[in-house]
Image (spheres, helix red, strand yellow):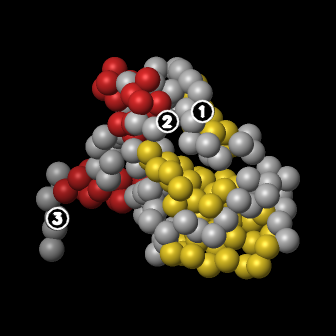
Amino acid sequence: MKRPLFLIPALALFSIAAAKCMIPESWEGSSPNGRVKVRVTRDGVLQIRGAGKAVLDAKVNLPGHHIDVFATDAGDRVVLADRYGGVAVFDGRGTQVNAWKPTQLLTKQEAARRFNSFACHPEGVWAKSVRFDGVNLLYSVPSGRTAQINVRSGAANTAPPALNAAR
């Protein structure tokens, strides 16, 4: 049976979009000194190992499924950052202590300039990049502004006023 030729490009595009949104079994990260190892499964099981702590397995709510994982050197904070879905911070026992949606991390003008959208995420990313310095999650937004969230206090030092007002 012959397939119509117009279906071939459509199937190719669908395959590319699906590949970008394939959810891995787990995501892994560590503390800046490498002593604390963190793994979170797609089912939301957070595993923290190291820093002289007992092994922890806790069930958590994920901020999305494109996750970067970070931990403090003491293992008392774990950060899950999804450039499409937002940020969640957990303590060393797996209890969520803070969370931010993209709308809380961007100005209205920045939200309108989100990019890198595709079928799975038509809204696009809220951050060009995220990195962790051991205390602060630093993120670069589409406007070029770099802001930070102190993962211990929840204070945003250079974020939009709306984020600080929400605290």
**Mark sitting on residue 3:** 3
Residue at left 56%, top 24%?
A: 158
Q: Nearest the camera: 13 or 51?
A: 51
Check disc 2: other Cα within 10 Å, few if <14, some if 14-19, many if 20+: many
Q: Are marks 2 and 3 in contact (CB under 8 Å)?
A: no
Residue 155 percent coordinates (x, y): 57, 36
Q: Earlier in the sequence, mark 2 or mark 3?
A: 3
Q: Nearer the viewer, mark 2 or mark 1?
A: 1
- Residue 2 lies, with reference to residue 10, above or below; the image says below
Identify the residue at horizontal 16%, vertical 68% (top origin). Answer: 2
In x, y percent, where is residue 10? 23, 53
Q: Along the horizontal axis of the image, is 103 left or right of 39?
A: left
Looking at the rendered structure, the kind of residue marked 1 is: Gln
What residue lies at 85% left-to-right and 71% top-to-bottom? 52
- Mark found first going from the N terminus, 1 or 3: 3
Asked which secondary structure carries label 3, the reply is: loop
Q: Which residue is mark 1?
A: 148
Q: Nearer the viewer, mark 2 or mark 3?
A: 2
**Mark 1 neighbour class, 10 Å CA radius: few under 14, some 14 to 19, many 20 or more:** many
Quickly name the residue at label 2.
127
